[in-house]
Amino acid sequence: MRMLALAVLVAPLWAATWRADVEFARAGDIPLTLDASIPDGAGPFAAVIVVHGGGFIAGDKQTYVKPLFEPLTGAGFAWFTINYRLAPEHPFPAAVEDVWSAIRHVRTHAAGYKVDPERMALVGESAGGHLVSFAGAKAPADARVAAVVSFYGPHDFEARERALGALSTNVKAFLAVSELNPETYRKMREASPITHVHPGMPPYLLIHGTKDPTVPYDQSVRMCESMRQAGASCEIFTVDGGGHGVGNWEKTPAFQAYKERMIDWLRARLK
């Protein structure tokens, strides 16, 4: 029954227009680009901005997140997959600022993209999961969204690095730090979405595998608990036995139920 439900979810696909390498902002002399999939028809459509992973130091708008494209297209969403500045050349908060710039771009050009600027969501995985969680929690007034979906994002750097007993290469690059000391802990707290939980946050859906060796499943559990305690809305969808990466999940049919849940949740929040 589950496989049948997923088949209905993604087929038939909506017809859509593809726009590639649209410059949405410029950081100094660095052009930031996105790819857009816009449903055919009058709209306005609900919109999703997709943020790739890669440990803050690698990846682009067409890597790691491709398994999310077909479900979003099939559900009739307009969606945008973005590039952002990478560490160590561009440490925190550069990437978060780029996510906000993408939101502003889509809002400013909503009519051209046939989207409803009040029905926008962020979806990110891994490092991108962190970025969308942080961007949603700390968004300035002109970059707010209606919903956030974070796949296995690190939400509490301090807890994660204390558990490791050392600084990971990715955190060193992202935060421009080299050793564990009071200043590094301050930076980790400042860059952690869990630090910025508040009642006015948009609703969050956290999707995480229980066997994730890179970002412990507990990172999502603790983030959700903190949001609920603050009076914000948060749900977890657990991929039992899932490791790290939606690309890896593609190999296991039992892990595919997250697609249906993601679409149902987005439809409900962006109705």
Image: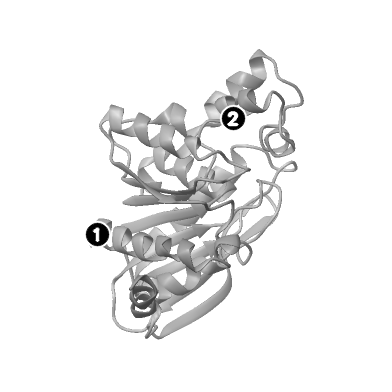
Q: Residue at x 41, y 70 (%)?
A: 72
N-terminal label among 2 and 1: 2
From the viewer's side, name the closer residue of 106 and 268: 268
Quadrant assignment, res 184: top right
Circle 2 sits in a helix, a strand or a loop, which is it?
helix
Residue situated furthest top in the rendering: 182
**Residue 58 in sight here:** yes
Residue 37 spot, x, y in % from top left:
46, 75
* In this picture, residue 130 sits left or right of residue 90: left
Query: For this view, does 228 lie left or right of residue 179?
Result: left
Q: Quadrant of the N terminus?
A: bottom left
**Disc 2/disc 1 C-alpha distance (Å):** 32 Å
For the point 41% across and 60% down, which residue is it? 258
Residue 162 badge: none
Q: Which residue is mark 1?
A: 268
Looking at the picture, how far across and down is residue 14, in whole percent? 37, 83
Residue annotated with mark 2: 160
Residue type of the residue flagged with mark 2: Arg
Location of residue 8 with respect to 256 vertically, above or below: below
Label 1 SS: helix
Crowd class of label 2 (few under 14; some 14 to 19; many from 20; radius 10 Å):
many
Kind of residue at disc 1: Ala
Disc number lying in front (2 or 1): 2
Pick the quarter of the image with the C terminus.
bottom left
Establish if 87 lies above or below 38.
Answer: above
- Name the residue at 69% across, 15% down: 181
Near-viewer residue (210 or 162): 210
- x and y percent of residue 138 in the render? 42, 36
Coordinates of residue 58 in the picture (x, y in percent): 71, 53
Task: Report the side of 260 relative to 253 (left or right).
Answer: left
